[in-house]
Image (spheres, helix red, strand yellow):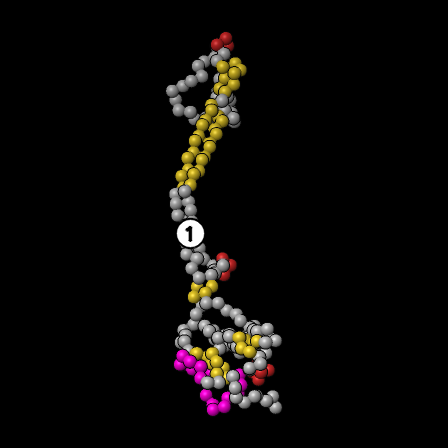
């Protein structure tokens, strides 16, 4: 530190006290009447009512950042506070990913068939293209059953089949994650920031 710093200059020091003429940058309120020169330089940028008190910068647990808008960066203003130690990611912040589907799938199928016929008196000797009918004994119709395997197609609609399938499942996608905030902290070393309360008043010229 110089023997006579500019009023308001801030330094990093490795000791746990503020030397004479300096104060810790811990956001404390100072009297305007007793520190008029420093108040003239920083005003109420960092707090205070501007009538009897003003606040020093609070650099506890924070790093300073150059004000203005760098190339491709957001605008930062003097005295602006931002940032967080941790961040909990929202769903739309997660990278695209998939989950495994676990469980079992059971399918049960019930089939019922109805052999349909006609209740009219039989008048055909061949089943080809015909339906089963009532035996016409008066017409001397032969029996309509045989021990031979069926080899001909009967009339469409002779057999009506209904199939009902019931599917039950225990499939699930298990929840993952613990909703634990992500640590945003960079590697750090704790030191004290101090600000000069007295010294040379900086000139704009």
- Residue 13, horizontal then vertical, whole percent: 42, 82
**Residue appearing at x 59%, y 82% in the figure:** 40
Q: Residue 12 lies in magenta, yes or no?
A: yes
Residue 48: image quadrant is bottom right
Q: Is residue 162 above or below residue 199?
A: above
Residue drawn 49% across the image and 82% down it: 195
Residue 100 falls within the magenta-colored stretch: no
Along the line of sight, the residue nearer the viewer: 122 or 194:
194
The magenta segment is 1-19
Q: Residue furthest top?
A: 138
Is residue 67 visible in the rendered image? The answer is: no
- State which quarter of the image contains the C terminus: bottom right
Where's residue 46, x and y in %?
55, 75
Magenta portion: prevailing SS class:
loop
Q: Is residue 41 above or below residue 168?
A: below
| Residue 1 visible to the viewer | yes
In the rendering, at what x and y percent does residue 116 appear?
49, 22
Q: Is residue 184 above or below residue 12?
A: above
Q: Position of residue 153 (x, y in %)?
A: 47, 27
Dot 1 falls on a residue whose secondary structure is loop
Q: Nearer the viewer, residue 146 or 70?
A: 70
Quadrant position of residue 180: bottom left
Residue drawn at (44%, 57%) of the image: 179
Q: Which residue is mark 1?
A: 175
Image point (47%, 90%), residue name? 2
């Amino acid at each position: 530190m110089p023997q006579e710093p500019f009023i308001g200059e801030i330094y990093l020091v490795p000791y746990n006290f503020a030397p004479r003429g300096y104060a810790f940058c811990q956001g404390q309120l100072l009297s305007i009447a007793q520190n008029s020169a420093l108040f003239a330089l920083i005003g109420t940028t960092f707090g205070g009512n501007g009538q009897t008190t003003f606040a020093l910068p609070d650099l506890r647990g924070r790093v300073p950042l150059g004000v203005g808008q760098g190339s491709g960066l957001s605008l930062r203003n003097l005295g602006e506070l931002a940032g967080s130690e941790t961040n909990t990611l929202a769903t739309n912040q997660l990278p695209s990913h998939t989950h495994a589907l676990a469980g079992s799938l059971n399918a049960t199928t019930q089939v019922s068939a109805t052999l349909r016929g006609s209740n009219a008196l039989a008048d055909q000797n061949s089943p080809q293209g015909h339906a089963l009918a009532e035996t016409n004994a008066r017409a001397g119709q032969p029996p309509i059953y045989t021990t031979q395997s069926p080899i001909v197609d009967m009339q469409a609609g002779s057999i009506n089949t209904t199939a009902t399938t019931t599917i039950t499942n225990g499939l699930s996608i298990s929840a993952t994650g613990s909703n634990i905030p992500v640590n945003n902290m960079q590697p750090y070393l704790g030191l004290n920031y101090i600000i000069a309360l007295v010294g040379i008043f900086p000139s704009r010229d």
